[in-house]
Amino acid sequence: MFRRAFWFTAGAAAGVWATTKVNRQLKKLTPESLAAQAADKAVEAGHRLKDFALDVKAGMTQREDELNDALGLHQDPERPDNVTALPGPRRLRAIENIENTKNTYRPNQSAVTYDRNEDH
């Protein structure tokens, strides 16, 4: 008698457990539930894309700062939107260090002229 009662109770419990599992899965497959899951995934993907874009922007800013330091470019607070420019003395040094060649154009040296027809 106890054996039958045990198996009857075990069967009933297994039936209740299986019924609740099936009902939960069916509720997950309703159109409203699927739409909510899709919306949640879309919001999550949007947050991941936003985080990726912010990481890329931070990396670009860091790399730009590294390149500006390596090239000697400094930000001028008087220029709008943090536009960078070469400092004056360095620019003059670059112009002064140009080798004296025949076809080189030098805007500040009137002694050397450039004639385009000279080679023909």
Image (spheres, grey):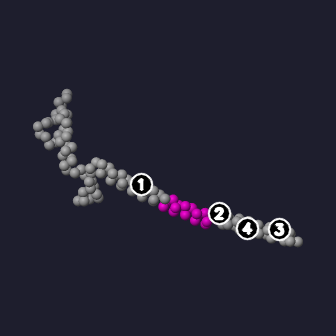
Kindly identify the amino acid type of the residue bearing the numbered disc 3: Trp
Residue named by callout 1: 56
Q: Can you identify the residue that label 2 sits on?
A: 29
x, y percent for residue 19: 73, 67
Report crowding for label 2: few under 14, some 14 to 19, many 20 or more residues within 10 A (C-alpha). Answer: few
Q: Is residue 59 magenta?
A: no
Separation of residues labelled 3 and 4 (CA atoms): 15 Å
Q: Residues within 10 Å of mark 1 (few under 14, many from 20)?
A: few
Whichever of callouts 4 and 1 sits on the residue coming sooner in the sequence is: 4
Q: Which residues are magenta?
A: 29-47
Of 2 and 63, nearer the camera is 2
To which quarter of the image does residue 106 belong?
top left
Residue 92 drawn above or below residue 35: above
Mark 2 / mark 3, whichever is N-terminal: 3
Secondary structure of the residue carrying numbered label 4: helix
Amino acid of disc 4: Trp
Residue 61 picture quarter: bottom left
Q: Which residue is mark 3?
A: 7
